[in-house]
Amino acid sequence: MAIKRFFIRICMHNKDKKKSQRRITRLLGQWLLVCVCIALICTWLFVYFLQNWLSDRETKNLLSINISDVTADISDASDENLLALTHTVADLLEEGRTDLDVIAEEYSISEINVVNADGVVTASTYESFLGYQMADGEQSGEFCVLLGDAEEYVQSYQAISYDESISRKYAGVSLSAGGFVQVGYDAEEFQKDIDVQVIGVTRNRHVGQNGYIIISDESGMIVSDRNGGEGEDLSVTGITLDTDSVSVDQKFRAEVYGESCFCMYEYTEGYYIISVLPVSEAFSSRNMAVATTVAMEIIVFACEFLLICFLMWHLVVKNIYKINDSLSEITNGHLDVTVDVCTNREFTSLSHDINATVDTLKRYIAETAARIDQELAYAKEIQYSSLPGIFPPYTDCIQFDLFASMNTAKEVGGDFYDFYFAGEDRLAFLVADVSGKGIPAAMFMMRVKTLMKGLAESGMEVNEVFTEANTRLCENNESNMFVTAWLGVLNLKTGLVEYVNAGHNPPLVKYRGHEFHYLKSRPGFVLAGMDGIRYHKNELQLSPGDTIFLYTDGVTEATDAEMILYGESRLLAAVNREEMTPEELCAAVKADVDMFVGDAPQFDDITMLALKYKGDGTEGN
């Protein structure tokens, strides 16, 4: 009656079909347009911020690279001039000159020190330095390399150790008689020598296409400027160097000669080297990328919108109309009508479900079909000694006949079966398949098997066994392994089977006088896959002579040499060929699988368990 009412509601709903079709189509189009617009906006924002970040990074790199190049050129020029001057002083000393003060004044040198082979200052323009051991100071100790194999050494421009208010640059040249001469001069002195070179270094240098380099001395006077500002104060460019708030190598923004620019500076050899790049050039690539992306995405999304609408109409809406037309005929009493919309998997499944419902109304026979494609690859077998291997297992029990087998693909695996009494007249039986392979799968199988048996024998309900087992298996499961399982508890007196399924293959059930069919039930989530899962108990009533057959996916997913699956249909045909005992049933299925596979290698374990309920033993033999 409930199914009839369902079809009546469908029929009433279809009375205004054309109007409803227009509403569905319009609603789909509206929501699709909203989604497309949101996607466009999100994509534009993402591209904008990404390109902005890339432009900012490229700008920093461009400014920094040009500063580094100029710094290196200035440093090289300064080093070259200072070394030439130091060699001149060394030559004078080799000629016998000892008037260091006169030499220093003659060549505008701030400091001259003569050091002997022991690293001691023997002559200096500073009398307080006489007798000083060069190795005792951090800065002076660097020149001790001249007491070895080095012939010349230049130290970077920096504050001197004995007076940090004074910055000076030193160079040293070894003497032929041993020791070396050290010459130092201040920025003001050596800048006079290299100003011409500095101007040449930056005059024709471009930062990007329109950027440039500006160099000023410590006082802020411009030394080199492509715009002709030499000799002027740096402020005429619009740049104000606040070294307290803007650090070296930090990008900042300024109006340079009336144009908004990104700037970066470095201080070296007494010079401020400022790299300048117009903002318009820095963001030109960003603006071009965003504009191109926006234009292309408008075209692409518009085409996608039209294509999706077209596909939605032809693949979904039209098929819904076809199904509704068939349902209208069925609800009007034409039960021989079949729904045949098989354009894709979803509508094929829906058509099959409707046809199965109609068959149920016609024959009042439940036909169930459940296909669960679980690709649990590389399952391995546990040692046979851990599984019950004596059949019949309980010779004094006449209420049932049971047989199980496991054929492994490799040395060790993860499939297992088990059966035991979980109380008086309560037989627990299960089949499970552990993910993974090799020794880890076998160890995890042993844990699952022991845990399941302990929980079941404690008297818990089958669903509570799985719920508690899942909680414990999720603890410290760093390997992320999981297990599918089907557990049933048979009441030997009543024939009632209480069972729970954790993502496992559906079993086959044969009622006496009928053929095997798949047991349809909604499976729960796999064990150890997610903490907090609660499992639900299902019930199946067996009568004397009924049989239930459990198996792992190694049966249905066995493949031949052409990689064709054995499948559930072949399994169903194999078990329905003739009336068989549990042992004969397992042997027949294994033989049929072997015949189908042929010479192809076995990739997965094949595990089966068959249970025939006999009741008090007077029936079903």
Image: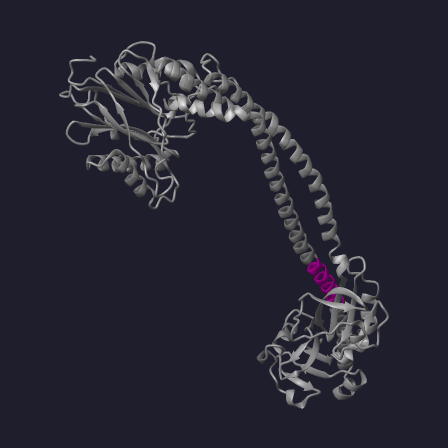
Expressed as whole percent of the image width and height from the top left, the position of residue 610 reads 27, 20
Which quadrant holds the C terminus?
Answer: top left
Residue at 37% in and 37% down: 482
Q: Residue furthest left?
A: 396
Residue situated in front as seen by the camera: 1 or 122: 1
Expressed as whole percent of the image width and height from the top left, the position of residue 9 reads 45, 26
Q: Relative to residue 203, is residue 118 depicted above or below? A: below
Q: Relative to residue 18, is residue 303 depicted above or below? A: below
Residue at 66% in and 48% down: 44
Q: Main secondary structure of the magenta part?
A: helix
Magenta run includes residue 289:
no
Q: Residue furthest bottom?
A: 127
Residue situated in front as seen by the camera: 78 or 517: 517
Left or right: where 297 falls relative to 416:
right
Q: Relative to residue 194, is residue 40 depicted above or below? A: above
Q: Which residues are magenta?
A: 59-73
Residue at 28% in and 29% down: 499
Left or right: where 250 falls relative to 488:
right
Expressed as whole percent of the image width and height from the top left, the position of residue 105 reads 79, 86
Which quadrant holds the N terminus?
Answer: top left
Left or right: where 503 falls relative to 208:
left
Residue situated in front as seen by the camera: 602 or 150: 602
Residue situated in front as seen by the camera: 156 or 11: 11
Q: Quadrant of residue 588?
A: top left
